[in-house]
Image (cartoon, rainbow, N blue to C red):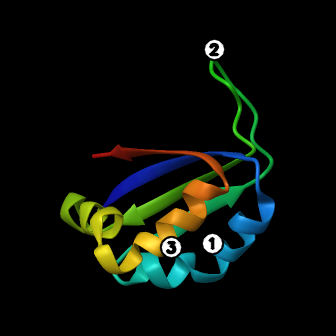
Amino acid sequence: MIYAYVHLKIDKPESLAKYREVAADALAKHGGSVVSASKDVALLEGDIETPHMAALLSFPDQEKAHAWINDEELQDVHALRRNSGQSTIHLMA
């Protein structure tokens, strides 16, 4: 099992709302799921801008995570997330 950390700065909540409607199915297509997601994010240590929302995703392996982000059929789904503001995803392998 590996994890991906999603850091979101949201400028367009309506786009994020549309993304949330389809995100679980998009993740499930490649064996992924949401472990945790929250708008209540606080900086514990360091000097980085606190996101408006953060999520922790799980995947069976790195290949599945890469397949999810690179899936041509899911590009419109990823576009909803990206269009909601700044989206950064870190793979923790």
Residue 4 is left or right of residue 71, and the answer is right
Amino acid type, residue under disc 1 in the picture: Tyr
Q: Nearer the viewer, mark 3 or mark 2?
A: 3
Q: Quadrant of residue 83?
A: bottom right
Mark 2 burial class by Cα count in 10 Å: few <14, some 14-19, many 20+: few
Residue for badge 3: 77
- Distance from the alpha carbon under mark 1 to that under mark 3: 6 Å
Residue 4 is left or right of residue 44, and the answer is left
Residue for badge 2: 47
The kind of secondary structure element at disc 1 is: helix
Nearest to the observer: residue 43 or residue 48: 48
**Mark 3 and mark 1 in contact (Cβ < 8 Å)?**
yes
Task: Give the residue drawn at x 71%, y 27%.
Answer: 43
Nearest to the observer: residue 92 or residue 80: 80
Residue 38 is left or right of residue 75, and the answer is right
Is 87 placed above or below 30 here?
above
Amino acid type, residue under disc 3 in the picture: Val
The kind of secondary structure element at disc 2 is: loop
The image position of residue 48, as x and y in percent, is 63, 21
Q: Quadrant of residue 72?
A: bottom left
The image position of residue 18, as x and y in percent, is 69, 76
Going by the picture, which residue comes out furthest to the top?
47
- Distance from the alpha carbon under mark 3 to that under mark 2: 31 Å
Dot placed on the residue nearer the N-terminal end, 2 or 1:
1
Q: Nearer the viewer, mark 2 or mark 1?
A: 1
Residue for badge 1: 19
Residue 26 is left or right of residue 84, and the answer is left
